[in-house]
Image (cartoon, rainbow, N blue to C red):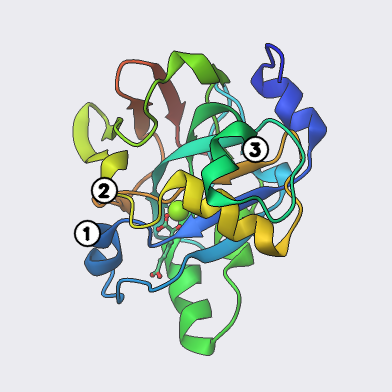
Amino acid sequence: MASNRLAQFREFGKKIVAVGRNYKAHAEELGNKVPEKPIIFTKPTTSYLSQGHPIKFPPGCTDLHHEVELGIVVGKKGYQIPEEKAKEYIGGYFVALDMTARDLQLEAKKNGHPWTLSKGWDTSTPAGEFIEKDKITNPQNLQIWLKVNGEMRQNGNTADMIFSISYLISFISKYMTLEEGDVILTGTPSGVGGLKGGDVIEAGIGDVSKIKFSVDSS
Ligand SMILES: O=C(O)/C=C/C(=O)CC(=O)C(=O)O
Ligand SMILES: [Mg+2]
């Protein structure tokens, strides 16, 4: 993948594949069991948000949560990719927020319904700039952090993922073709929590890339 910016992978608009409960401490903080195989869901590309625009509460939500995640941008098309070849399919990275309407998600969970609306409304995937693949030597050893109004809320390391990036690429592509421009959100570390209108979120991957978003207060 050449030197693509966020606008380009949004333009490809293929798909956003997200992983849930991929850090033990996060699974446990929400009272969930540690998964035995990856939990996969998708988000629409209309949920992307670039910096300079506010994150909105979706209708009916009063418990909006932040989740910082390492985003993988797929660099080339692949189906049933062997784990040992998975790294070849990484085109780059970005810092992402998998914003979650936790109250809507809880209601969906209770009823056995999908998480789509609680994860997929417009503005629910704030995203940073594209990071070239070669800027990150080991994606499985990155500090991943998030502050709200200057206070550290999430501070994890991608070394603590339950399922590695290579495993996830191989697992997802057993079921669906991954295409250039698709992204994988690799799950959030612990420390997720509620937000209010006017809050300012800063998040990043070590000192490689940083994002800043505010929550709409209107
Ligand atoms: O099961 C729950 O209560 C919540 C799970 C998530 O929101 C999963 C994620 O999106 C994640 O772990 O990043
Ligand atoms: Mg998430």
Q: Residue furthest left?
A: 151
**Residue 60 in view, yes or no:** no
**Residue 52 in view, yes or no:** yes
Identified by mark 3, the residue type is Tyr
Q: Earlier in the sequence, mark 2 or mark 1?
A: 1
Could you say which is closer to the camera, residue 206 or residue 37? 37
Q: Earlier in the sequence, mark 3 or mark 2?
A: 3
Q: Residue at x 39, y 47 (%)?
A: 67
Real-space Cα separation, disc 2 to disc 1, in angstroms: 9 Å
Q: From the viewer's perspective, tell me whether residue 24 is left or right of residue 40.
A: left
Identified by mark 2, the residue type is Asp
Q: Nearer the viewer, mark 3 or mark 2?
A: 2
Picture quadrant where residue 179 is located: top right
* Looking at the image, residue 80 lies above or below residue 148: below
* Looking at the image, residue 23 lies above or below residue 206: below
Residue at mark 1: C-beta within 8 A of ligand 1:
no
Identify the disc placed on residue 25: 1
Q: From the viewer's perspective, tell me whether residue 186 is left or right of residue 189.
A: right
**Ligand 1 shown in quarter:** bottom left
Real-space Cα separation, disc 3 to disc 2, in angstroms: 26 Å
Picture quadrant where residue 200 is located: top left
Considering the numbered disc 1 on the image, is that residue within a helix, a strand or a loop?
Answer: helix
Q: Position of residue 46 (x, y in %)?
A: 73, 43
Real-space Cα separation, disc 1 to disc 3, in angstroms: 27 Å
Labelled pair 2, 1 in contact (Cβ < 8 Å): yes
Identify the disc placed on residue 137: none
Identify the disc placed on residue 160: 2
* Looking at the image, residue 25 lies above or below residue 195: below
Q: Position of residue 42 (x, y in %)?
A: 64, 58
Q: Residue at x 18, y 32 (%)?
A: 151
- Report the residue marked by disc 3: 48
